[in-house]
Image (tube, coloured by chain):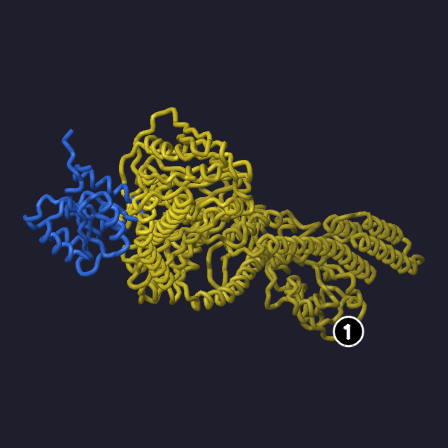
Chain colours: A blue, B yellow
Amino acid sequence: MEEKTKCSTKKVLIVEDEKAVRNALFGKFGKLGFKVLGAKNGKEGLETMSKEKPDIILVDIKMPVMNGIEMIKNFKNNEKFEGIPFVVLTNDSTAETMAEVMSVGGTQYFVKSDTPIEAIVDKVKLMLNCE
Amino acid sequence: MVLFFEIFGILFSVILVYLGIRYLSKEKALLDKEKKRVELLAGSFSGLTSITGSFSALNHIAESLTNFGFEKVLILTANKEKLALTGDIGIGFGEEFSPSEIEIPLDKEKQGILTQVFFDQAFQVFDEKKKPKIENISVKSKLLESSFMIAPISRKKDVSCWESTKCSKTECPSYEAKDTRCWLTPKTDCISHLKGNYDESIFEAPNKKIKACLDCNIFHCLGIVLVAKNKNYRFSEEEKTLFHTFAYQAGAVLEKGYLLTDLELREKELSRRMYELSILKELGDRIGYSLNVEKIVDIITSSLVKLLDYSVVAYMLLRPDKVYFKCQLEEPLNRKFIDDIRGRMLASLAALMNQEFKDSDIEEELSGTVIDNTMNDPIRSFFNIPIVIAEKTVGLLTIASSKPGLYKENEVNILYKITSQASNAVSRLESVLEAEKGKLNDMVVSMIDGVIMVDNDNRIIAVNPAAKKMLGITEEEPTIFDIINSLQGKLDIRSKIEESLKLHRTIVIDELKIENLILKVFISPVKPKISLKESKENLLGVVVLMHDVTKEKEVEKMKSEFVSVASHQLRTPLSAIKWFLEMLINGDAGEANMEQISYLTQAHETNEHMIDLVNSLLNISRIESGRITVELEKLDIIELCEGIFDEIKMIAEGKKQKIEIVKPKEKIPNILTDPKLFRQVIQNLLSNAVKYTPGGGSVKFTISKNNDGYLQFDIKDNGLGIPLHQQDKLFQKFFRADNVVEMDAEGTGLGLYVAKSLIGTLGGKIWFESEENKGTKFSCTLPLSGSKAKKGEKTLISTDVSKEFSKYHAVSKS
């Protein structure tokens, strides 16, 4: 098995309009030693990305100004951000949204209210192969 | 009555005899040689009393007359059927003809004076085969060659006519009443003549002196009696009186005969009327309120056999596309007989309807006796009566017989009376119904809902304005095709109608979108109200009711959208709470003490419950709006069930319950269904069983293949059970049974509602058996043939009781 890297070296970008949710994730990942970056919407998220290249992005779908799908499309089309994994965290569990996420290359999709925060942490750790 | 007349007759004869004897006794001294004659006379009359039957009585009189020395005696009686005087008895005439062969036609113009007719008319002689042997023989030359006396034979009660010398001019009331016997002699001057002389000289100028007072109400002539000598001879007064007495006696005899016949006739008539009445009553009773012409005619024909003599009764009824011919045979006949009737009836019907019918138009039904082609009787008696209902000819009724001369005016009249009675009854009933129908029509016209009535042959019987407006139909009287066009292919109404008729069941189409409207459509079979025996087979058609549910659907949609949005908005803060609590419990913000953990855990549990509730609400709004997607996969259902079972097993074991799964022995092929939806159903049922069964209880999950092509899932527990009085509400939204609420069990009251909706969507069924405090068995089925896919907009949110949470989380149920 490949040697796992330290999670404290990883940068997590959280794009979430709902302050409480953002703070929860911020707190959790911060406690675990991740470098956590925050953004209120897709546009802010893209701006942050261009300043500081994150290792993984946790992105909400329904957001004002620019929604999650738009943001994903944007950075997916940008060579600069090639290969950055992302996890979709949303409360919109409709088939269309899920299909849209898949169409922009999303593979990780969590319904927030149904997912324990620990499960998200585990998923991120797994994706980044870190401890 | 008969006896009375008999006695009366005898009495009269006795008096006459007595009178005769008294008359003769006056002459006794003078006419000693006449003594023998008197005895003879007395013998004749007393002998007469013992004779029954008019003919033998007349014969006796004729013989007596010859005994008194009259060489020729001829008695002719009026035969009303032949309209002729026919010879009854003739004695002393030559070999040329027998007097019984004589037939003297009665001229209507000269009717009334029988003797007159007798003189004027030539007569004919018929042979045995009723062919004229000799025609136009002069009565005078043949019968009255020499001296003769002639007297009319009259009715006894007209005796005054014999005695009076002059009777006034009388009217004949019986003539006015068209008594068939009266045609003989209407309005006759009643001049008595019998007191006068009957010698030839008088008869030489009959018009001047003799006018027989014949058939007025005081003198009813029944015939003529004639005596003659073979030579010219002057009759003595005595002979005249004797002849007079005998002629008179002949009248009494004939009258008695007639009276008897009359009586018999009247009796016959009476009993026929009784029959007629009883049949009419029976008809009334049996027809009841039926409007079915065929049935009514059947009743008539089945009653007829009591009334008429016939070989065959048949009827033809006009149907829209054919002629229905029903023939009831009362005796064996050959096929030709029936074909003859068929032909005659068809011709009559064609004439009656002024319409051509082909033999191929006929639908034939024979009943009664079988056809016997060895019989070769032709139709000898036959008559038709049209069947008319509400002034419209609908068919023909026919009676036929192989016997000749059966049907006269009377028979035709009876049948006519019966059929018209029946058709009147039907006509009246129809008019009542018409009026009722009018009311009903008004009601249907005023209805807000669209109503279309369709009969068994897909003909539109009625379409109300609301229906026309809904479907945008402009035709005054639309056909089924107009309706089909107006539905724009959105509803195959014809097959739905067929289905409804076939299954005897109302078909409901929940949503039919036509232009801007959403209609709920009910297609119900129409059963006849009067429960006839055959009513089950005889549906009248269907009624299609269209209820505009556009508004309701809009409200429903808004409601479910509201629920969806609200639920969605709730989920986000709930997830924030959830995560913060998880972090606190996990010690992310510093180790919490036991008490703190306990509180946080309860807060988390409550929050989870809230999330569950919101998810359930979201699911329900999706299911109810019909926007749920059904995505099919070929599934190993047993494997899926085992998976669910294993998850639930953990919870059950936590409660120290005994839980087991029983799988079918045979291999179950993969089934095409939506795993997510199906999973939800089984999960709900299994988790309910565990939830509502106290610790230490048992839960058994059995999967089996039933005989109807379904896989059946039984989930049996020995838990709380469902109170009997609440069992019917179990599948209602938000319903929770009292005993469950009481024990403080968590739940939303949505699980079973969701399960029922989902299993229905997948083509299965759900039901249960339960007894409070004993346990519950829920059963549901899934078709082995698979579910139907459905493209919706929403997928189901998992409301998994054993969410991954438990896998990750440290929160222990304390």
How many numbered marks, from 0 up?
Answer: 1
Residue B668, compared with residue B131, is above or below; it is: above
Q: Residue at x 72, y 73 (%)?
A: B170
Q: Identify the image quadrant of the N terminus of chain B.
A: bottom right
Q: Is B782 positioned to the left or the right of B772 in the image?
A: left
Badge 1 amino acid: Lys
Residue B30 percent location from the top left of the image = 92, 59
Q: Identify the image quadrant of the C terminus of chain B.
A: top left
Q: Which residue is mark 1?
A: B166
Q: Chain of mark 1?
A: B
Residue B485 percent location from the top left of the image = 28, 58
Q: Nearer the viewer, residue B318 or B499?
A: B499
Residue B160 percent location from the top left of the image = 80, 67
Q: Nearer the viewer, residue B770 or B743?
A: B743
Outermost residue toward the left? A79
Query: From where the camera sits, is residue B793 visible?
Result: no
Residue B353, compared with residue B592, is above or below; it is: below
Q: Nearer the viewer, residue B232 or B676?
A: B676
Outermost residue toward the right? B29
